[in-house]
Image (cartoon, rainbow, N blue to C red):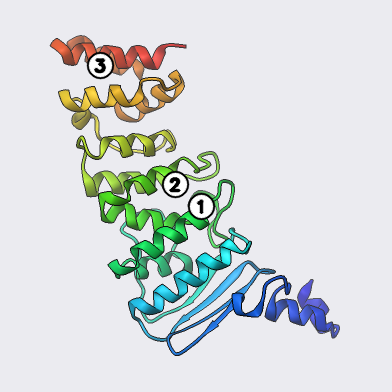
Amino acid sequence: MLNCAIELGSERARRLTKEGSGTFAKEDVCLRDEMVDCTANDVFAEVSIAIKQETGESYARVLRFLTRLLSLGFPKSYQIKLKSSVKQWLPIKGLAKSGTHRFFANALDYPELYPFMVEYAKAAMEPFEWYADTEGEKNCMPGSYAVFGLGLTDRTFFPLVEEYMGKVDDEHQSVQNHFTVAFKERHGVRTETIPTLIKCMLHCTDSMKLKIQSDMEHDLNVRLLLDQVRGLPYYQVEHIVYLIWGGTDKLKKIAAKAEGERARWLTELAEAAGRK
C-alpha cells in the first residue's frame, strides 16, 4: 500500500518509507560515524546496519544503539539488515541464516562486548515476540542469538540462559531444542551444568534428541536430577523423563534392574513423573 501511495505522489508515504513513523527522535533512530551506519525504521520494524570498520568498538556502538532503541519502545519483533565483510554463524544447527543472526555471531568474536550483549538480551527478550526474519520452526524470540552465543561461551552466562528459557513460548518456537543439544555438547553433563540443562529441557519440545541417558544414570547425576525436579508438577517431570529415557515405563524398567541408592532414586523419579 505504501508503494502505491508513493506512486500516487504521497509525501507522507515517502517519509514513512524513508524515516519511519516519526515517533522517535532522529538521533535515536540514526547513528552515522566513521565506524558504523545505522538506520532504524519502526514502520517496517527494520534496522539497517553497515559495519564500516570490523572492530569491537564498531559492534559495541551498534549494540548500545540497539539496546537504547528497544528501551524507547521500538518494535521488538524486528530484523537487522546487515552489511558486513564478515560472515559468521553460531555453532548451532537449525537456526535461520539471517542478517540478525550474523550480526550477533560476528559480535561474539569480541569478549569485551559480552556485557553489552547481556544488556541487549535483557532489553530484547519478550514472550510472544519473534525476530521478523524468522518463521516456522526457525522462529526465535528477540535476544536468542545473543543468549545462545554467550551460553555456549562460558558458565557465567548460565543464569542468562535460564532467564531466557523462562520466557520462551515453546508452542511457537523450537530453536531452543538446537541450542540445548549444542549446550550439552559444549559443556557436558556435570553437577555444574545439570541445573541449567534441566531448565532448558523444561522449555524444549518432545521432538528433541538429546542423548544423555547414560550420563544421567550416574549416581551423583541421578540424585541431582531428582533434587532439581522436586516440587515440579508431574507433567513437567514426565516431560524431562521422556526426553532422557523415552518415557516413564522405560525408566521403571531401568530402575527395577538398578541396585542400591541408584535404584531408589530412579524409582522416586518415575513416581514423581506419574504422580497426578
- Residue pointed to by mark 2: 164
Q: In this view, does 145 lie above or below 245?
A: below
Under circle 1, the secondary element is: loop
Q: Which of marks 2 and 1 is nearer the N terminus?
A: 1
Under circle 3, the secondary element is: helix
Q: Residues within 10 Å of mark 1 (few under 14, many from 20)?
A: many
Q: Nearer the viewer, residue 39 or 6?
A: 39
Eye-nearest disc, 3 or 1: 1
Q: Can residue 7 be seen in this view?
A: yes
Marks 2 and 1 in Cβ contact (< 8 Å): yes
- Residue pointed to by mark 1: 125
Side (left or right) of 244 relative to 1? left
Residue 97 picture quarter: bottom left
Side (left or right) of 97 relative to 69? left
Q: Residues within 10 Å of mark 2 (few under 14, many from 20)?
A: many
Label 3 to label 1: alpha-carbon separation:
36 Å
Q: Is residue 158 above or below residue 85?
A: above
- Residue pointed to by mark 3: 266
Q: Position of residue 37 (x, y in %)?
A: 51, 83
Amino acid on which disc 3 is placed: Leu
> At 36% from the left edge and 48% from the top edge, which residue is drawn?
179
Q: Is residue 178 visible?
A: no
Side (left or right) of 49 relative to 231? right
Q: Where is residue 108 in the image (x, y as percent from the top left)?
A: 33, 66
Q: Where is residue 82 in the image (x, y as percent from the top left)?
A: 48, 75
Q: Nearer the viewer, residue 164 or 170?
A: 164
